[in-house]
Amino acid sequence: MSSPRIPLAGVIGHPVAHSKSPRLHGHWLRKYGLPGFYVPMDVAPDDLETVLRTLPKVGFVGANVTVPHKEAALEIADVASDRATLIGAANTLTFREDGKIYADNTDGYGFIENLRQGAPDWDPKAGPAMVLGAGGASRAILASLLHAGVPEIMLSNRTRLRADALHHEFGTRIQVVDWVQAGNALEDAALVVNTTALGMTGKPELRIPLDGLQKQAVVTDIVYTPLKTHLLQVAEEIGCHTVDGLGMLIYQAVPGFERWFGQRPEVDETVRKVILE
């Protein structure tokens, strides 16, 4: 007499011990009384494809992918969503019943949902956005802002070459601003987004002049350790509407959890507390 397999999922990174995802998914599994487990998996780059092809055979229905595997996971996948293809990276994999690996990227979705929840009055068409950083997170956020209807994005990165590459890839609505001029460009920004690790605990501070921030601007940081970065603290003092980065982590996890475990999880204050414990 056979019984259905308990669905398994997890997060793959290298390293991965720092990930908050097991705590988040574990909370939702307990909350909804669902069978299933979500585990961290430290996988070296050379072993990634072997692991991804093996996981479905032992009961895994999907996996999140984090640094440094997001680009490689997209390459390995058999099928990819349009947004994962546009961003050039995957963070959410689903192992389909036909044996194929489906790759998606929910980082941009998580960013926009967090922004809409944290700043309900934010209007994408209110004016230009200023995005700091041109790494992997920036790609997802640029794509989501363009899709939301932001008319122009000023993009600044310490290495201009990376910002120029994104300008050529995403088109003329992206305008590159030299890093030394980023402070001046803040004066025109209706939305300011830090996508870099600058300001994170253990990292250097984000050292650009912030006195150009306008009171009517919405300011958000994808960093969530600390929850209130120097950028958000200064923006709050100026009178800007600020949105911390914790919600992006939570909201990007929603689509994967729903696909793997069959329940769309609710994002509430309890979830935030669970992650911050």
Image: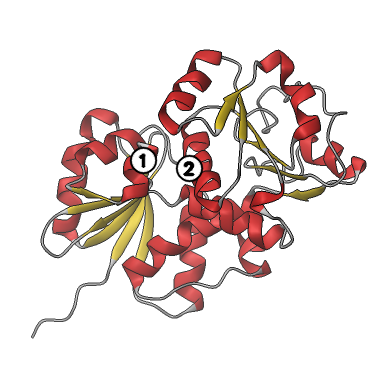
Q: Are the residues at dot 1 and dot 2 in contact (C-beta closer than 8 Å)?
A: yes
- Between 145 and 225, the residue placed more toward the observer is 145
Q: Is residue 250 left or right of residue 58?
A: right
Circle 2 sits on which residue? Answer: 143
Quadrant of the drawing holding the C terminus: bottom right
Q: Amino acid at mark 1?
A: Leu
Furthest residue in direction left, as rendered? 1
Q: Where in the figure is residue 4, as x and y percent of width and height?
A: 18, 78
Q: Residue furthest bottom?
A: 1
Question: Residue 270 at x, y = what percent?
Answer: 65, 69
The quarter of the picture where residue 230 lies is top right
Tell me the quarter of the picture where residue 71 sits.
top left
**Residue 86: mark:** 1
Q: What element does badge 2 sit on?
A: helix
Which residue is at a point 79% across and 22% down the rendered structure image? 184
Q: Amino acid at mark 2?
A: Ala
Closer to us: 48 or 264: 264
Residue 22 image point, x, y percent: 46, 56
For marks 1 and 2, the one nearer the N-term is 1
Residue 195 shows which numbered tag? none
**With 55 as the anchor, is 148 left or right in this view?**
right
> Disc 1 versus disc 2: distance between alpha carbons?
8 Å
Label 1 secondary element: helix
Q: Residue sitting at 55 percent across and 57 percent down?
A: 250
